[in-house]
Image (spheres, rainbow, N blue to C red):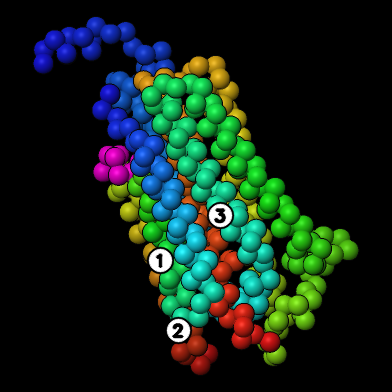
């Protein structure tokens, strides 16, 4: 309609519109596209570690089964649920911002951060129990070299105990990288929270919330794969193992 | 604005799907299925959960097709990474070198 065209051009540009974009729509889509391209590099980054996991699990099946069954399945499952809830609250934060409910979006961002923090605290307890059991690979921790209690681990006879270590190298590399991403996510959400607090977002401009949400959901997806691959891989064999 | 707004009803549904998927994967992990079926089942559930997150929480279902193309490209390159590396490692013992 001609009058529509006239009004769009008569409107002054939104203050958040950068000069190199035609309009807010184009700016938002460009931002989303850029974030996805970044997430592709993240997929390749984690993909390399998932490949290492696959190769070593194929090479040392018994050691991987024994080491995996020693992980705390309860804490792993609780953390999975914590992250799923945090993804939901993040999605709700995006929705609240889209419809212009500033108070709700602040509440949902804070909830998402609290759940992210809860995940990291639970992870820290898990890491600590691995430290107590001398399961930190190599001699990284002075006075606590890798020294598994073979009786507790139910390692089948004839399997080299050193192979257990490979599982824990991969476990700490992957969950550690995931936890680092969670920390970065908490940093990003802190910035988003401050921006939301200052009333920077509106139904017309909320791309930062949406893009941060993409990052948060991606980190959740990584955990969706890590949980079954690391914690559940050999639970069905637990009855048959020495 | 032609932006698509996803309503809480959808988010709650997806949240429940993810919760059920998590319970299913834990229950299935303790049952002894024949052959490699345990791993296949665990990965299938994880892929389904991830797909729901990507399509609804990450709005890909309502985004330009270009986003879907970029994700497909990433998965394609990851398939190359896995296929070539595994074809190497799994065939090394074929030759007595």
Q: Can residue B57 be seen in this view?
A: no
Q: In this view, does A70 lie above or below A37?
A: below
Say yes or no: labels 1 and 3 on the same chain.
Answer: no
- Residue drawn at x 48%, y 65% is B25
> Position of B75 compared to A176: left or right?
left
- Residue drawn at x 61%, y 77% is A65
Q: In the image, residue A135 lies at what x, y percent?
A: 76, 67
Say yes or no: labels 1 and 2 on the same chain.
Answer: yes
Residue named by callout 2? B35
Cα separation between marks 3 and 2: 27 Å
Cα separation between marks 1 and 2: 15 Å
Residue named by callout 1? B44
| Label 2 neighbour load within 10 Å: few <14, some 14-19, many 20+ | few
Q: In the image, residue A232 lies at what x, y percent?
A: 56, 69
Q: In the image, residue B96 lies at what x, y percent?
A: 51, 93
Tell me the subunit letter for badge 2.
B
Q: Is mark 1 on a helix, strand or loop?
A: helix
**Front label number (3 vs 2):** 3
Cα separation between marks 1 and 3: 17 Å
> Position of A150 compared to B66: left or right?
right
**Front label number (1 vs 3):** 3
| Label 1 neighbour load within 10 Å: few <14, some 14-19, many 20+ | few
Q: Quadrant of the N terminus of chain B?
A: top left
Q: Can residue B19 be seen in this view?
A: yes
- Residue drawn at x 60%, y 55% is A78
Residue named by callout 3? A80
Q: Start and end of the magenta stretch?
A: B58-65
Tell me the subunit letter for badge 1.
B
């Amino acid at each position: 309609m001609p009058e529509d065209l006239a009004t769009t051009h008569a409107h002054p540009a939104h203050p958040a519109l950068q000069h190199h974009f035609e309009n807010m729509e184009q700016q938002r889509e460009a931002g989303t596209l850029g974030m996805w391209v970044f997430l592709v590099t993240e997929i390749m980054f984690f993909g390399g570690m998932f490949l290492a996991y696959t190769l070593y699990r194929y090479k040392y099946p018994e050691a991987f089964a024994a080491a995996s069954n020693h992980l705390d399945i309860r804490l792993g499952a609780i953390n999975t649920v914590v992250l799923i809830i945090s993804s939901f609250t993040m999605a709700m934060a995006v929705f609240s911002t889209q419809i212009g409910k500033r108070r709700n979006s602040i509440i949902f961002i804070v909830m998402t951060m609290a759940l992210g923090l809860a995940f990291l605290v639970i992870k820290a307890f898990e890491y600590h129990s691995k430290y107590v059991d001398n399961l930190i690979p190599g001699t990284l921790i002075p006075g606590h070299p890798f020294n598994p209690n073979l009786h507790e681990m139910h390692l089948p006879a004839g399997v080299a105990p050193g192979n257990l270590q490979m599982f824990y190298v991969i476990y700490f590399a992957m969950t550690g990288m995931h936890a680092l991403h969670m920390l970065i996510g908490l940093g990003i959400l802190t910035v988003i929270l401050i921006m939301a607090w200052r009333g920077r977002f509106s139904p017309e401009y909320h791309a930062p919330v949406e893009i941060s949400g993409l990052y948060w959901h991606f980190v959740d997806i990584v955990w969706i794969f890590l949980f079954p691959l690391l914690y559940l891989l050999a639970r069905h064999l637990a009855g048959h193992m020495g | 604005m032609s932006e698509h707004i996803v309503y809480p009803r959808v988010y709650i549904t997806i949240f429940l799907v993810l919760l059920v998927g998590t319970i299913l994967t834990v229950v299935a992990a303790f049952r002894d299925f024949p052959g490699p079926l345990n791993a296949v089942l665990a990965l299938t559930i994880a892929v389904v959960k991830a797909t729901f997150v990507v399509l609804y929480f990450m709005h890909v279902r309502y985004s330009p097709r270009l986003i879907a193309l970029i994700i497909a490209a990433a998965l394609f390159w990851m398939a190359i990474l896995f296929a070539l590396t595994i074809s190497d490692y799994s065939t090394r013992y074929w030759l007595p070198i």
